[in-house]
Amino acid sequence: MRAIWKKLQSESAMREYEFRILNPDGSCRVIWHELGQDDSHAVKSANKISNGEQFEVWRGRTCVFRSRIDAAFVRHMRAMEREAGLSGS
């Protein structure tokens, strides 16, 4: 009985999170909903889903995390992509 109670408590402790994958200009491109144990786990999950892109993690109306990618880094990555495209031809 105790194990069932603990399982019910842990399930009820799950929180709903919204992950927003952002375009380079900061606009929202994808919204993903997921249940998570806490903010830290939600951020780790969103980081995996974002695949290196900028993202935000929301719990209700509260933004609990916002990634920032330096503009110089974005320019550098775009230049590398262009270079790779040119060298692959």
Image (tube, helix red, strand yellow):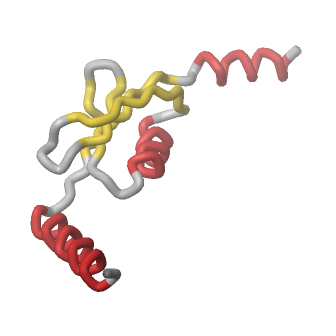
Look at the image and tell me in which quarter the N terminus lies.
top right
Outermost residue toward the right? 1
- Residue 72, quarter of the rendered image: bottom left
Residue 6 in the image: x percent, y percent?
A: 74, 22
Q: Residue at x 71, y 16 (%)?
A: 8
Residue 18 in the image: x percent, y percent?
A: 38, 28
Residue 77 vs residue 41, the one in the foreground: 77
Residue 31 in the image: x percent, y percent?
A: 35, 30
Look at the image and tell me in which quarter the C terminus lies.
bottom left
Q: Residue at x 60, y 16 (%)?
A: 12
Q: Is residue 4 above or below residue 18?
A: above
Q: Residue at x 34, y 81 (%)?
A: 88
For the image shown, how many numbered marks are present on the structure?
Answer: 0
Residue 83 vs residue 55, the one in the foreground: 83
For residue 3, side relative to residue 60 (left or right): right
Residue 75 in the image: x percent, y percent?
A: 13, 68
Q: Residue at x 15, y 42 (%)?
A: 26
Residue 57 vs residue 74, the one in the foreground: 74
Q: Is residue 67 above or below residue 78?
A: above
Outermost residue toward the front? 89
